[in-house]
Image: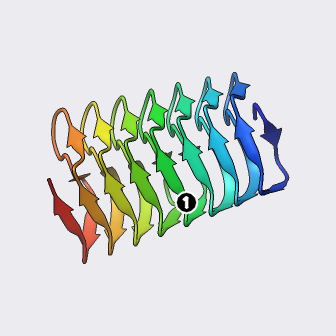
Amino acid sequence: GGGAYLGALYNCALTGNVADANGGGVDGGMLVDCRLTGNLSGGNGGGASYCVLMNHCTFLGNFAVGAGGGVYYGTLTNCTFISNTAGGNGGGAYSDGCTLNNCTFDGNSANAYGGGVCYGLADHCTFTGNVATNSGGGTAWVTLTNCTDSGNYAKYSAGGAYAGSLANCIVNG
């Protein structure tokens, strides 16, 4: 972790940190009411990686050479992801097997799949203006429930949702 490794962080700002491996801002631990801005990871998780819980956090303008521009793995509740970038999958977040509740993904980009999110379970989330170089501008391989997926773009297929399942969702634009 460029800014922090493990531990519990409350009301913290992690800005402009760099990690050669995972977690530009933080690697491991728990984040509550934190803001992660402009962090860089040479691996996965530009803002954060492998955090067990992130609640009421904002991820803004983070970059990962690998997957998860904002976050790589972790349970997310009431978090906001704006303008994060991944060199691989999941511009906003890469959350295989993780849950995202009431999160917003706006203007994130992935150089592969899932401009907003790649993998995971999303409930009551919003995906707007995200971009994927391959497929799934909004999401890729995500189970969506009660979500809104609008105005996203993918170069090859599925500007909204790619290879996932949707229940009670709105997909448009």
The picture places residue 7, in percent across and down from the top left corner, at: 85, 52
Q: Residue at x 75, y 48 (%)?
A: 28
* Crowd band around label 1 with a 10 angstrom C-alpha radius: few (<14), some (14–19), many (20+): many
The image shows residue 143, relative to residue 35, as above or below, that is below
Q: Seen in the image, is 36 located left or right of residue 133?
A: right
Dot 1 amino acid type: Cys
Say above or below: 93 vs 55: above
Q: Residue at x 43, y 42 (%)?
A: 90
The foreground one among 50 and 109 is: 109
The residue closer to the viewer here, 121 or 150, is 150
* Quadrant into which the N terminus falls: top right
Question: What colour scheme does the image use?
Answer: rainbow
Residue shown at the point (33%, 67%) measured from the top left = 144
Task: Classify 152 as above or below 1.
Answer: below
Which residue appears at 59% of the width and 35% of the height?
46
- Residue 120 occupies quadrant: bottom left
Point out residue 82 in the picture as x, y percentages from the top left corner: 46, 45
Q: Quadrant of residue 53?
A: bottom right
- 82 displayed left or right of 27: left
x and y percentages locating residue 67 in the rendered image = 50, 35
SS at mark 1?
Answer: loop
> Circle 1 is placed at which residue position?
79
Residue 28 appears anywhere in the view: yes
How many numbered discs sit on the rendered protein? 1
Considering depth in this image, is 169 or 73 the residue closer to the camera?
A: 169
x, y percentage for residue 137? 27, 44
Q: Is residue 73 visible?
A: no
